[in-house]
Amino acid sequence: MSITFKQLKTLEDLIPCEDLQEAVWKFNKNDIIPPRFMRVLCKHGGFAMGAFDDDTMIGFVFGVSAIHYGRPSQHSHMLAVLPEYRNHNVGYKLKTAQREEALNRNIDLITWAFDPLQSKNAHLNINKLGVIACSYDVNLYGEASSSKLHSGLGTDRLLAEWWLASDKVKTIIDGHTNDAVKQPPPKGLSINETRHDKKGFLIPVDPDLSLTDDVLLLEIPADIDEMKIANIETALKWRDLVQKAFLHYFDAGYYVNSLQVERDGDTRRVCYVLERLTTPYKSMTYD
């Protein structure tokens, strides 16, 4: 597969993003960002990059200028890849191109929101790109949108912080390694004990909100979309559990530093690894 990448600057460049938003998220016209608006934002500090198979756009990333921690940054609002082109590192390459362009403009932080229950997306963000997370938004986009991907479980989101010049990110991206994945699984207390039902789905158990160890593990289902189809009530319980755990432990001074993914027989087990902060994360590398 020969995929090429191009920065999107003109209105003509950005027009295919409209069809991709509809194809990927099934948005109606009310939720689609118009190419004209994207062009204005790109002219004033934003960024857009497209991925192409021959002349056909098959993915794009789009970010806007922002301020975090009192410093210029970028908020990456959209990353879209057509389903048939996923698992080919297209999203990863779009993000690394976004990082390179931001560093060229002396921007060292990119943020974006992601669904805490989508384990594959969490793996890309945390293990392949090196983001951390220390804040949680309840229903960031409202209880529902026109996208079927947002149906049933609201729109709770973790905020990814991608510190582009940190030692961690440089090791993962520039060194093409991921020490967090290669090292033995971190030892920590489990926030939630779990078990499987007869169909193999992970059953949620109320989180323990009394823990104070330096490293904690929060397990999530490996495939929340499959669970939504089979048992929406159980999926809703998972949303409540994860929301309750993250809100409590972020407030108590923890942050997400890695994602533990292990095989357990024929199934995957996925755990967020929360570590206690002694100083603000940005201070550990920058101040």
Image (tube, helix red, strand yellow):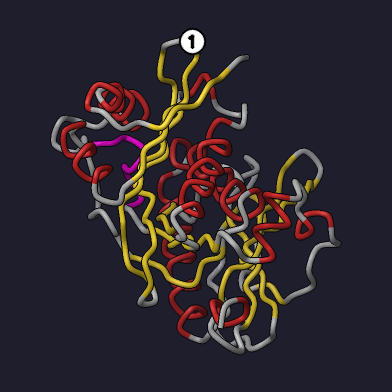
Q: Does residue 92 show up? A: yes
Report if residue 193 lies within the magenta region.
Answer: no
Query: What is the quadrant of the N terminus in the image?
Result: top right
Q: Does residue 254 show up? A: no
- Numbered range of the magenta stretch: 146-154
**Residue 61 lies in quadrant:** top left
Rendered location of residue 198, percent (x, y) = 65, 43
Residue type at numbered disc 1: Asp
Q: Above or below — where is 122 with respect to 167?
A: above
Q: Nearer the viewer, residue 205 or 121?
A: 121
Q: Would you say the magenta stretch is mainly helix, strand or loop?
A: loop
User: Which residue is rendered at x = 22% and y = 37% of the image?
Assistant: 39
User: Which residue is rendered at x = 48% and y = 24% of the image?
Assistant: 83
Which secondary structure lies at badge 1?
Answer: loop
**Residue 126 lies in quadrant:** bottom right
- The residue where tag 1 is placed is 54
Report if residue 150 lies within the magenta region.
Answer: yes
Query: What is the quadrant of the C terminus in the image?
Result: bottom right
